[in-house]
Image (tube, helix red, strand yellow):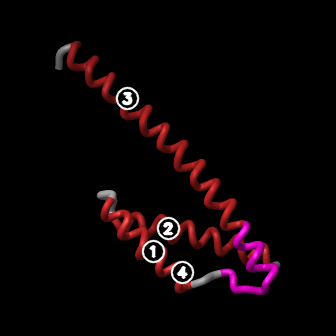
Amino acid sequence: MSDDATARAAALLKGHRESIDRLDAILVYTLGERFKHTQAVGKLKAEHDLPPSDPAREEAQIARLEDLANRADLDPEFAKKFLNFIIAEVIQHHRQQQS
């Protein structure tokens, strides 16, 4: 590979990595916002003696996310695993709030 081609590849790589870094920041801040809302939901559930999980809503959310993943050209199984992980964390937080 020529020095010019190597320099172009390095510039492209740098651009991709900068985009990935920005997207990672967006993901972290978005998850932070999401957990602020789920904490508020957990507080409401604890105050009104509601169960920490809502299987019907969780099932609907998983189906919704699978559809979004398909439209975004993202592996729906990955999206499903990701949401299941988040849901498990939220339920754990809700159970802690009820203790």
Look at the image and say whether residue 51 sits in the magenta stretch. yes
SS at mark 4 in the image: helix
Task: Tell me which label, 4 or 1, sits earlier in the chain.
Answer: 4
Residue 83 badge: 2
Mark 3 nearby-residue class (10 Å; few <14, some 14–19, many ≥20): few
Q: Which residue is identified by label 1? A: 62
SS at mark 1 in the image: helix
**Residue at (37%, 29%) from the top-left corner?**
15
Q: Which residue is identified by label 4? A: 57
Side of 4 where 66 appears, left or right: right
Residue 77, given in percent of the width and then of the height, sits at: 36, 68
Q: Amino acid at mark 3?
A: Gly
Task: Tell me which label, 3 or 2, sits earlier in the chain.
Answer: 3
Task: Tell me which label, 4 or 3, sits earlier in the chain.
Answer: 3
Q: Amino acid at mark 1?
A: Ile
Q: Amino acid at mark 4?
A: Arg
- The residue range painted magenta reads 40-52
Mark 4 nearby-residue class (10 Å; few <14, some 14–19, many ≥20): few
Residue 37, given in percent of the width and then of the height, sits at: 67, 64
Q: Which residue is identified by label 3? A: 15
Determine the CA span between mark 3 and mark 2.
29 Å
Q: Are marks 1 and 2 in contact (CB under 8 Å)?
A: yes
Q: Quadrant of residue 14?
A: top left
**Residue at (57%, 52%) from the top-left corner?**
30
**Residue at (32%, 23%) from the top-left corner?**
10
Mark whose residue sits in front, 4 or 3:
4
